[in-house]
Image: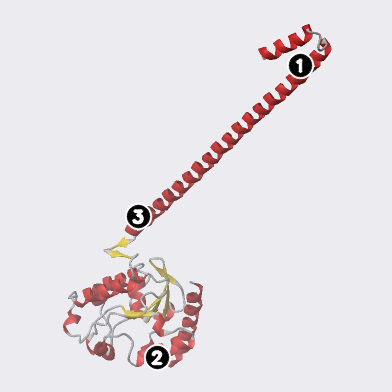
């Protein structure tokens, strides 16, 4: 800058250029210098802007990373809640989050050693239950008969054939449901189970229902109906009443819908009840389709 002033002054002194010309040249030079300065300043601004965008991009990256960690945290929290829920569902030593079939098998082995009543001394085989333990419905009869005692399976005699036929007529596959009885050992002479026997064995039925967790129960006959519902309302449901008063209606046991109907064996002696039983099972099928 000092050199430029010196040159301008020398040109002026030597009268090589006029003062006006020097002023114009100086202005042009200064304008050029100002333009360069502005360009440098603009470049600097662009640099700062680029740097700002870079930091902004870095910020977005960190924010995205933070969201990722938050998502991971929520995932771990969800897993923790699931495990806590599993603990909450461990009822009576039974973890209902585990697979149903192994638990049913384990309970079956446990019941084999039961000596709560005298029926275990007379049985041939324990009749625990049969069918699909992952089904949404459980059918409950009263007690094993002679054929069941020999095979170890529920409802395999003439009453069992009657049940299979009626289920098929309303569109229910017997193999797809679970079937059991109130008591697991055959009473002598196929007599009705005694209240003390049903009370002794009820714990095992309750455990079965706890593991299977069905949405619907169909009780077959008065003994299974009054034994199950009598644990909820003993004064309303007792053995002296007739099943006719309760069949075809909807009740509840521990939040599970219960529909009572006639026992298949009763239909062998009272065929006039079959139409009502089919009607009850049709209602059960419609309820089953909705769950």
Q: Nearer the viewer, residue 33 or 80?
A: 33
User: Which residue is denoted by mark 1 in the rendering?
Assistant: 26
**Hey, which quadrant is residue 251 in on the image?**
bottom left
The Cα–Cα distance between marks 3 and 1, rounded to whole angstroms, is 84 Å
Q: From the viewer's perspective, is residue 204 above or below residue 267?
A: above
- Residue drawn at 40 percent across, 71 percent down: 214
Q: Which residue is denoted by mark 2 in the rendering?
A: 162
For disc 1, the neighbor class at 10 Å (few under 14, some 14 to 19, many from 20) is: some
| Residue 289 locus on image (x, y percent) | 50, 76
Q: Residue at x 78, y 9 (%)?
A: 12
Image quarter in which the N terminus is found: top right
**Marked residue nearer the N-terminal end (3 or 1):** 1
Q: Position of residue 248 (x, y in %)?
A: 46, 78
Give the camera-side residue of 130 and 205.
130
Residues under numbered marks 3 and 1 in contact, where contact means CB atoms less than 8 Å apart: no
Q: Where does label 3 land, which residue?
A: 84
Depth check, mark 3 against mark 1: the one in front is 1
Question: Which of disc 2 and disc 3 is earlier in sequence?
Answer: 3
Q: CA distance from mark 1 to mark 2?
A: 119 Å
In this rendering, position of residue 190 left or right of residue 78 = left
First of labels 1, 2 by sequence position: 1
């Amino acid at each position: 800058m000092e050199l430029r002033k010196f040159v301008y002054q020398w040109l002026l002194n030597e009268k090589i250029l006029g003062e006006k010309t020097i002023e114009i040249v100086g202005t042009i030079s200064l304008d050029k210098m100002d333009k360069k300065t502005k360009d440098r300043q603009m470049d600097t601004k662009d640099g700062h802007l680029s740097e700002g965008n870079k930091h902004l991009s870095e910020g977005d990256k960190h924010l995205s990373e933070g969201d990722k960690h938050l998502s991971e945290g929520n995932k771990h929290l969800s897993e923790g809640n699931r495990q806590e829920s599993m603990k909450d569902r461990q009822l009576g030593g039974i973890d209902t989050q585990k697979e149903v079939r192994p638990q049913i098998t384990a309970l079956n082995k446990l019941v084999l050693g039961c000596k709560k009543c005298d029926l275990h001394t007379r049985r041939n085989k324990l009749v625990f239950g049969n069918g699909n333990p992952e089904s949404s419905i459980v059918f409950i009869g009263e007690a094993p008969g002679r054929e069941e005692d020999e095979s170890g399976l529920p409802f395999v005699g003439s009453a069992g054939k009657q049940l299979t036929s009626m289920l098929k007529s309303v569109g229910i596959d017997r193999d797809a449901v679970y079937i059991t009885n109130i008591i697991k050992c055959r009473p002598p002479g196929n007599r009705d189970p005694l209240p003390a026997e049903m009370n002794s064995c009820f714990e095992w039925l309750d455990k079965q229902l706890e593991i299977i967790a069905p949405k619907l129960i169909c009780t077959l006959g008065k003994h299974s109906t009054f034994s199950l519902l009598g644990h909820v309302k003993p004064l309303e449901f007792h053995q002296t009443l007739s099943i006719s008063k309760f069949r075809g209606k909807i009740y509840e046991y521990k939040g599970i819908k219960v529909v009572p109907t006639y026992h298949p064996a009763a239909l062998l002696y009272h065929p006039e009840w079959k139409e009502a039983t089919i009607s009850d099972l049709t209602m059960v099928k419609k309820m089953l389709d909705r769950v």
